[in-house]
Image (tube, rainbow, N blue to C red):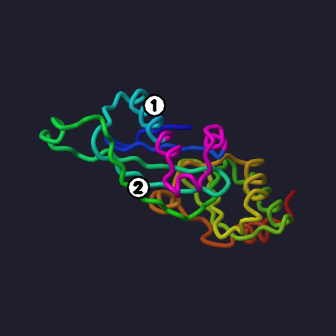
Amino acid sequence: MRLERLTTNKIKIFLTVDDLSDRGLTKEDIWKDSLKWHQLFHDMLEEASEEFDLDIIGSVAVEIFSLHAQGMVMIITMMEQDEDEELFDDGIIEMQVTVDGREEILFQFEDIEDVIHLAKRLKHAGIAGGSLHYMNDQYYLHMNGILPEQAEKTVALLAEFGVSSFLSIHRLLEYGKEIIEENAVETLVHYFEKDG
């Protein structure tokens, strides 16, 4: 589990599939709003509270983004409270959960050469598509529309050349530079097929 403070009242939590299984949870438990999920959520809030020295009371908004075969990202926003509300606080945290069912695969790379070699491996494995982005001296390959049966293979190949990114594609589109909008794998292979 990885925690990151985004603003004074907003925290990002990244949970891998292993983090979930270590706690006896699956992604389905979260969608079903199970008791185990509530326990995990309170444990995460406690850890975030200690790490960032926050008092998390009252209402929190939770946005959940599923990252296919990688885990999930949660954005937790602490809501503003009136002073009157705090007087009646009894330690109960009210959750407003929004689940984003989209599944995305996003990896980052330090060198364009790694992305080119990866594209050749992906094409050889029968995996196509993707978009290529650049931001803060890093290249990002966003794979969407991957068939569920190809997701694990895709992530395994991507992990050979880069690391899973915690950024959202929306942030990349807003602050980064889009190099190849679609069919990045095919485009890279087409232009660099004679190299290496």
Residue 171 on image: x %, y %: 47, 57
The circle on residue 47 is 1
Image quadrant where one finds the C terminus? bottom right
Quarter of the view holding residue 131: bottom right
Q: Are marks 2 and 1 in contact (CB under 8 Å)?
A: no
- Amino acid carrying mark 1 in the image: Glu
| Highlighted range, magenta | 18-40
Does 52 sit above or below residue 179? above
Quarter of the view holding residue 119: bottom right
Majority secondary structure of magenta residues: helix
Q: Residue furthest front?
A: 35
Residue at figure coordinates x 51%, y 50% from the top left: 34
**Helix, strand or loop under label 2:** strand
Residue 115 on image: x %, y %: 72, 56
Residue 173 horizontal side relative to residue 21, left or right: left
Verify whether residue 177 appears in magenta: no
Q: Which residue is mark 2?
A: 97
Quick one: 185 or 143, which is closer to the camera? 143
Of the image marks 2 and 1, the number of the one nearer the N terminus: 1
- Amino acid carrying mark 2 in the image: Val
Quick one: 32 or 151, which is closer to the camera? 32
